[in-house]
Image (cartoon, helix red, strand yellow):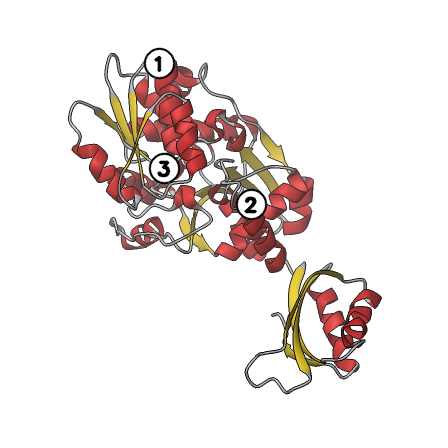
Amino acid sequence: MVTAERIREAHSRISEHISGTPLIYSDSLSRITGARVYLKCENFQKTGSFKIRGAFNKLSGLKGESVIAASMGNHAQGVAAAAAALGIKATIVMPEGVSPAKENAVREYGAEVVLHGQTLTEAIEYATSQEGYTFIHPYDDEEIIAGQGTIGLEIADDLEGADFVIVPVGGGGLISGVSTYIKSAWPDAKVIGVQAEGATSALESFKAGKVVQREPGPTLADGIAVGRAGEITLKHMLENVDEVLAVSEAAIARAVLLLMERTKLVVEGAGAAGLALVLDDAVRFSQRSVVIVISGGNIDFTLVDRIIHKGLAESGRTGTIEVVLDDAPGALHRLTGIIAARRGNILNVVHDRLSRGLPVKKTSVSVTLEVRSAEHLGEIVSDIKKEGIHIKEVPQ
């Protein structure tokens, strides 16, 4: 088992290679959630993720060896950057569907990239089958765990204590290290792991007390989309973690958007999962001090617009109303006048005169609105109904 002492040794070993990231108290997120919210910002870490900590700790013990790793992106960049700094040749195996941005970033650090398989599990199996390399596991390795645990050490050094420490969980390397140190420094603190609803191997393994494999579905939190928790990591989790929970895609999208708006932090889906949990379960965390580990900021910018739109919808700030109007001059103007009177902002209008069951001389109109809140949207809907306009579909 990794100990707090091993984590302190790891920190001494890697401190010259990594950034000591800030622990930020957020007034705005504290007001919104009712908790006292601190953010451990690993999105400011070199390579944009905590993964470089474990990579440096593992690779610093290797001399004259070639290494191979498998990763969806962040571990790949961490290993590639650490290998380049230490003069070690690195090959990275990535699933074929990996983000081109993350693939390019790994190549820019000087590593060779091999695309293989559709999942991280398949990439790991391929990497471990290659001869002549030292395999650098993304999470199920004591030196990796000790390196990631240096985050817990820095949190404890920067804060006198906290009621909760919330950590994203994929394979479990991060939470294993952080929980080990936090429980040593703050025995009464609750350490909670958080997963995406579409990738719950660690959650199910934690509940079962044994490794349960569950291949992940599509998720905004691709950094924690891992199909199998580690044997070593699960032992540490069962020893030091109080609970593992899951959050929805909608909650993750809302958290990513909120971090951009209120803290000006660009955070990937996995990194926002902890805030998503606090937003979803505000009563539990109300008036408590909560440290949220923001694990990384390597968001795929081709997804940012979709995440923003989903986040706006889930926070009640956009909505789509579908109405049936007379297909005659002035009908649409009447509808838009009602919306304007309530200061709703029209983002998009779509006409459909050909829907099945739609009477002749009628048109179906779908209007997407920007509003202040769900209550504001409800006021607009109420005014439309008062004017006798038939609403086919009202957003929930």
| Distance CA(mark 1)–CA(mark 2) | 34 Å
Task: Tell me, yes or no, if residue 147 can be seen here.
Answer: no
Q: Nearer the viewer, mark 1 or mark 3?
A: 1
Kind of residue indicated by mark 1: Leu
Q: Three-letter amino acid code at disc 2?
A: Val
Nearer to us in this view, 78 or 281: 78
Q: CA distance from mark 3 to mark 2?
A: 30 Å
Picture disc at residue 304: 2
Label 1, on which residue? Answer: 86
Query: Are the two marked residues, 1 and 3, in contact with CB atoms closer than 8 angstroms?
Result: no
Q: Nearer the viewer, mark 3 or mark 2?
A: 2
Question: Earlier along the polypeptide chain: callout 1 or callout 2?
Answer: 1
Mark 2 element type: helix
User: Do the CB atoms of the residues marked 1 and 2 lie less than 8 Å apart?
Assistant: no
Point 45% across, 46% down: residue: 221
Give the side of residue 298 with respect to residue 377, left or right: left
Residue tagged by mark 3? 176
Amino acid of disc 3: Ser
- Secondary structure of the residue carrying tag 1 is helix
The C terminus - image quarter = bottom right
For label 1, count other residues whose C-alpha is less than 10 Å away and answer few (under 14), some (14-19) or many (20+): some
